[in-house]
Image (cartoon, rainbow, N blue to C red):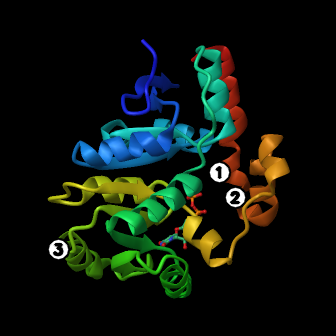
């Protein structure tokens, strides 16, 4: 059976579920129409993290749409005979913001530093004046503030919630919100930092050569330990684990 834009096929990479669909934006809109749910953007590092961390694994398993964001996952899918395009989460999130502005969706942004959140809020109000930003909160709140924030967030009845708390926290946090229903909820990692201009994305040629990971490593050398999972991922897929 072929995957369609609105009915993705489900498969697994190293046991972690991934949706195969020709157009992730259309698939996200279809999910919103079906009542919403959680979108996860899966890369090789996250796949290995999900295997090692059962709470992340469970959050991904419970998500409604898991898109292949990363050359490693696309390669693993190709080995199963699925030809898919890499779908960077940052691009899907931006497309959804544009759509939200056109359609009057209620949008919530959670995560990143207080400075980035302030900058991003101002920037989005300028770039997408029609955008209905109904809730914004940075990601460095004291532990006791979160329950109240979650309550306010749900009361704002968002149609789209972008969460920049990093992996695995953003995925497990979305999963754990009591009474969450309706709307698209998506972890977006460092996207707010990129949009606000405090972090840069790898140049397109590095993306094309599938060495975006190298750019990230050069920009944030402290990630080297996390990145050891990349050769482990490649080896496990190659062995057919
Ligand atoms: N972050 C946050 N609260 C925290 C830790 C991180 O809001 O307690 C934010 C951080 O400021 C950044 C994002 O989460 O905007 C994580 O970005 P990163 O590129 O590290 O994402 P990942 O690679 O983990 O998806």
Residue depth check, mark 2 versus mark 3: number of the one nearer the observer: 3
Give the percent coordinates (x, y) of residue 37: 29, 48
Does the Cβ of the disc 2 residue fall within 8 Å of ligand 1? yes
Q: Is residue 53 visible?
A: no
Q: Residue at x 35, y 70 (%)?
A: 107
Query: What is the quadrant of the C terminus in the image?
Result: top right
Q: Residue at x 74, y 58 (%)?
A: 216
Q: Secondary structure at mark 1?
A: helix
What residue is disc 1 on?
A: 226
Does the Cβ of the disc 1 residue fall within 8 Å of ligand 1? yes
The local crowd at label 2, few if under 14, some if 14 to 19, many if 20 or more residues have their Cα within 10 Å, is: few
Look at the numbered discs 2 and 3 and tell me whether their residues touch, using CB distance below 8 Å. Answer: no
Look at the numbered discs 3 and 1 and tell me whether their residues touch, using CB distance below 8 Å. Answer: no
Residue 223's disc number: 2
Q: CA distance from mark 3 to mark 1?
A: 36 Å
User: In the figure, is residue 63 to the left or right of 69?
Assistant: left
Look at the numbered discs 1 and 2 and tell me whether their residues touch, using CB distance below 8 Å. Answer: yes
Dot placed on the residue nearer the N-terminal end, 2 or 3: 3
101 to 33, vertically: above or below: below
Taking depth in this image into account, of 90 and 168 the one nearest to the observer is 90
Taking depth in this image into account, of 29 and 229 the one nearest to the observer is 29
Give the percent coordinates (x, y) of residue 237: 63, 22
Q: Residue at x 42, y 23 (%)?
A: 9
Residue depth check, mark 3 versus mark 1: number of the one nearer the observer: 3
Give the percent coordinates (x, y) of residue 124: 51, 79
What residue is disc 3 on?
A: 155
Q: Residue at x 43, y 26 (%)?
A: 4
User: In the figure, is residue 51 to the left or right of 143?
Assistant: right
Taking depth in this image into account, of 19 and 102 the one nearest to the observer is 102
- The quarter holding residue 71 reads top right
Q: CA distance from mark 2 to mark 3?
A: 37 Å
């Amino acid at each position: 059976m072929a995957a369609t834009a609105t009915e993705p096929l489900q498969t697994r990479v190293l046991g972690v579920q991934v949706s195969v669909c020709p157009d992730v934006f259309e698939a996200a809109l279809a999910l919103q129409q079906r009542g919403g749910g959680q979108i996860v953007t899966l890369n090789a590092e996250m796949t290995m993290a999900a295997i090692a961390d059962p709470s992340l694994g469970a959050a991904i398993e419970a998500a409604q749409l898991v898109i292949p964001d990363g050359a490693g996952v696309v390669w693993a899918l190709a080995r199963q005979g699925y030809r898919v395009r890499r779908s960077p989460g940052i691009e899907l999130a931006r497309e959804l913001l544009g759509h939200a502005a056109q359609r009057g969706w209620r949008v919530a942004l959670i995560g990143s530093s207080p400075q980035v959140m302030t900058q991003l809020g101002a920037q989005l109000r300028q770039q997408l004046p029609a955008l209905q930003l109904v809730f914004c909160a940075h990601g460095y709140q004291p532990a006791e503030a979160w329950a109240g924030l979650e309550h306010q967030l749900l009361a704002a009845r968002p149609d789209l919630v972008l969460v920049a708390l990093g992996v695995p926290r953003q995925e497990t946090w979305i999963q754990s919100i009591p009474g969450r229903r309706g709307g698209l909820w998506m972890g977006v990692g460092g996207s707010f930092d990129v949009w606000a201009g405090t972090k840069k994305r790898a140049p397109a040629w590095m993306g094309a050569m599938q060495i975006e990971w190298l750019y990230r490593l050069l920009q944030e050398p402290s990630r080297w330990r996390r990145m050891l999972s990349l050769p482990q991922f490649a080896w496990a897929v190659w062995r057919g684990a």
